[in-house]
Image (spheres, grey):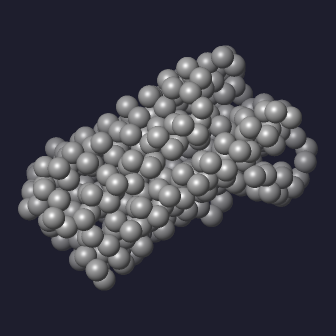
Amino acid sequence: MVAAFHVGKVPPALPSIRDGLGASLGQAGWLLSTVNLISALGGMAFALSADRFGHRRLVILGTTLCLVASVGGAFAGSVELLLLCRVVEGLGFITVVVAIPTLVLRIADSSDQRIAMAFWSTYMPTGAGSMMLVAALILPFASWRGVWLVAAAASAAMLVALLLAARSRRELDRAPVSDRHLVKEMAEVATSGGPLAIALCFGAYSCCWFVVVGFLPTLLIERLGVSASTAAIVTALVTIVNIAGNLAGGYLLQRGVPRIAVILGATLPMAFCAAGIFLDGVPDLLRLVLAGLYSAAIGAVPSALFTAIPVHAPRRPLVGAATGLLMQGSNIGGLLGPPITASLVSAGGWASAAWLTSIALGVVAGAGIFLHWREKRKLAA
């Protein structure tokens, strides 16, 4: 959740960054998505490296990188330098995120793994949403640089807590790993249909998620004329209600509801909600209601996908690698969504963004159907 602070600090601060550094809308899109760049390029490699390096060590290293990069970004004098710091924050973020699921599965009872992974899937809306609320309180009195320093202070506090408490926990020690070559294990996961479908599904989901949440503050300011602090608060609340979907998805799966029902039940109706957020002629209040409904309902998708990893990993020792592939797909979607949206909006106005959200949610539904077919075959075998 603290690592996700460095994702959530950006959307409310974009208007301040554009004023202070003269960033264009396209550069703002890259500021939103650059943190995903490293994850998009090598999420699975990071996950397999975590198996060898040690997951606890990687969490500590990633927290340190987020701390250093956030401090550096707070004193950046140009958009280019700020983008460079965002790349380092992306490196820190992915090292934390790929390391934790394996530890969660290791310490949870087998009967609790679905609900444990559902709780884990709340890290993004909880962390990012909390940071958005903090940013909304800071921005009326300080620039975006103050937000960066607060996020750095949170990472510093977490780093101290990890060094004091986590290092002594023996159950978090590095587990024995396979002596197979890392590239061979990556190939085994990358050529498996289940993990690939999960990665594609999560990538399309993340594309929609970052499009709606990332540009919602800018949309509120430009289209509805609200203040930057009000836009930040509204966006934070829209982000936080995503937690309800995460937990509801985990509860439904724990109660035996099929994964495909959760995915299709969330994505197909929400394609219309997401489109309504951007289309012209929609009343302002209804636009905000649609954003909140979209965020809450679509949150069931991550729970369904995270809990699918132990089922679809080629072998139990490759659960971490399958998680890395999921994060890689997720971050490819998060990386491409905002810049594509910025280009569409610049060319055809905000209504153009509705095309991207509709297509991406259709991909989520299609990948979910394939995953269901694959899961039926695997369980039958």
Classify residue 269 as left or right of residue 15: right
> What percent of the width, then of the height, locates residue 54?
71, 38
Quarter holding residue 218 = bottom left
**One can see residue 177 in this view:** no
Q: Nearer the viewer, residue 90 or 369?
A: 369
Classify residue 356 as left or right of residue 380: left
Query: Is residue 178 positioned above or below 359 on the image?
Result: above
User: Residue extending furthest bottom?
Assistant: 347
Q: Residue at x 67, y 50 (%)?
A: 370
Classify residue 99 as left or right of residue 180: left
Query: Is residue 303 positioned above or below 83 on the image?
Result: above
Q: Residue at x 30, y 42 (%)?
A: 293
> What percent of the width, then of the height, locates residue 205?
49, 53
Q: Nearer the viewer, residue 76 or 17?
A: 17
Image quadrant occupied by the N terminus: top left
Quarter holding residue 210 = bottom left
Q: Residue at x 34, y 68 (%)?
A: 353
Q: Nearer the viewer, residue 363 or 2?
A: 363
Classify residue 179 as left or right of residue 79: right
Query: Is residue 21 positioned above or below 50 on the image?
Result: below
Q: Nearer the viewer, residue 144 or 26?
A: 26
> What percent of the width, then of the height, locates residue 308?
65, 37
Q: Residue at x 27, y 49 (%)?
A: 291
User: Residue extending furthest right?
Assistant: 179
> What percent of the width, then of the height, locates residue 111?
66, 17
Query: Is residue 311 positioned above or below 359 on the image?
Result: above
**One can see residue 102 in this view:** yes
Image quadrant occupied by the C terminus: top right
Q: So how many labels did they put on this image? A: 0
